[in-house]
Amino acid sequence: MELLQLQYFLAVARLEHVTEAARSLHVTQSSLSKTIQRLEEDLGVPLFDRTGRKLRLNEFGSRFLRRAERALFELEQGKQEISDLSSPEHGTLELAVTTASPLPNILREFRKKRPNVLFHVQMLSAQNMVTLLHRGEVDFCLSSPPIYEDGIDCQIVYIDPILVAVPKGHRLATRSSVSLTELRNEWFVGVKKGYGARDFVDSLCQSVGFEPKYVYEGDEPARLSALVEAEIGIAFIPSTARNSREHIHYLQVENHELVREIALLWNKSRYISRAALEFREVVVEYFEVISQKTI
């Protein structure tokens, strides 16, 4: 059994399509098919049920996939460990986030300590983040809400107040706080359903008797401040995403604990390089500092 066979098998097993797997591996379909066929011959059983170029893992394939992923995971960890030992000042941190607002400041602080370490950051849904965590393909994830699953460490690093952002000319712009019921007739801009903070805020508004009316729903939380400033609508915005624009005013919500939890996640089995350990320290220290400022 060859390492190449395992790598090709993983690609086909995850995509369940020969053409797409070959494209992702930058090889020809015939070469990929022959490699998978040799693997099945070595094992003495078929690993897929085939319908044209569409494949589906059978019971043999599903069981073998778990073992193959574990074997390649351990080899990759060994490769990273050797790289860390031989060149500790360089390397790449693999990061994934569901909440990006605090990341620029965190990366700036980390770069002061490790100027030669590169970053690869992905903005993902919670489901895709969990998949990469279990595969050991990322060093750390910054997530809101937290994720609790076997094999994943979850450290709450910050309790982030959610504020109400209104344009400076708004009727509430002279206030420091507002009750949820006073927002009943407002138009909102926000992210789409499925984002943790959006779902939480919607359910809280429903608990006091109304459902927020959204004039805009998007995939980019960073765009909301510009829409508020343009007087398109008001928005619920976490304090870590608070923008210093002069034409936006922020209010606290009265009588409700309107907060989100931000968590740092990592795979318990993944090798953590020295640079990654320092990154974790920077994240924790960063949120400790901003927590002190809000006391």
Image (cartoon, rainbow, N blue to C red):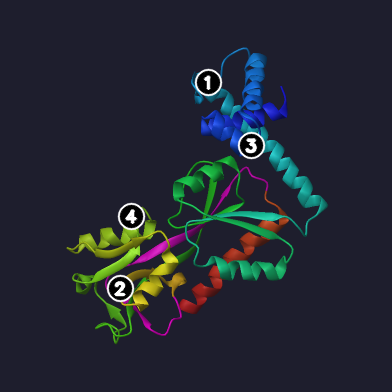
Q: CA distance from mark 3 to mark 4?
A: 34 Å
Residue at coordinates 66% horizontally, 26% vertically from top-left?
31
Give the answer, above or below, for where 240 lies relative to 6: below
Q: CA distance from mark 2 to mark 3?
A: 45 Å
- The crowd level at tag 4 (other Cα within 10 Å; few <14, some 14-19, many 20+) is some
Q: Earlier in the sequence, mark 3 or mark 4?
A: 3
Specify the farthest residue to the right: 86
Residue corresponding to mark 1:
48
Which mark is in front, 1 or 2? 2
Q: Earlier in the sequence, mark 1 or mark 2?
A: 1
Nearer to the camera, 287 or 21: 21
Q: Is residue 284 left or right of residue 159?
A: right
Q: Amino acid at mark 2?
A: Ile
- x, y (%) of residue 125? 45, 51
Give the answer, above or below, for where 234 lies relative to 12: below
- x, y (%) of residue 58? 50, 20
Residue corresponding to mark 3:
25
Nearer to the camera, 2 or 197: 2
Give the answer, above or below, for where 177 lies relative to 120: below
Q: Which residues are magenta?
A: 243-271
Q: Amino acid at mark 1?
A: Phe
Q: Amino acid at mark 4?
A: Lys
In the rendered image, which quarter is residue 32 located in?
top right
Q: Which mark is residue 232?
A: 2
Check disc 3 and report its element: helix, strand or loop: helix
Contact flag, marks 2 and 3 (Cβ < 8 Å)? no
Check disc 4 and report its element: helix, strand or loop: loop
Residue at coordinates 67% horizontally, 26% vertically from top-left?
5
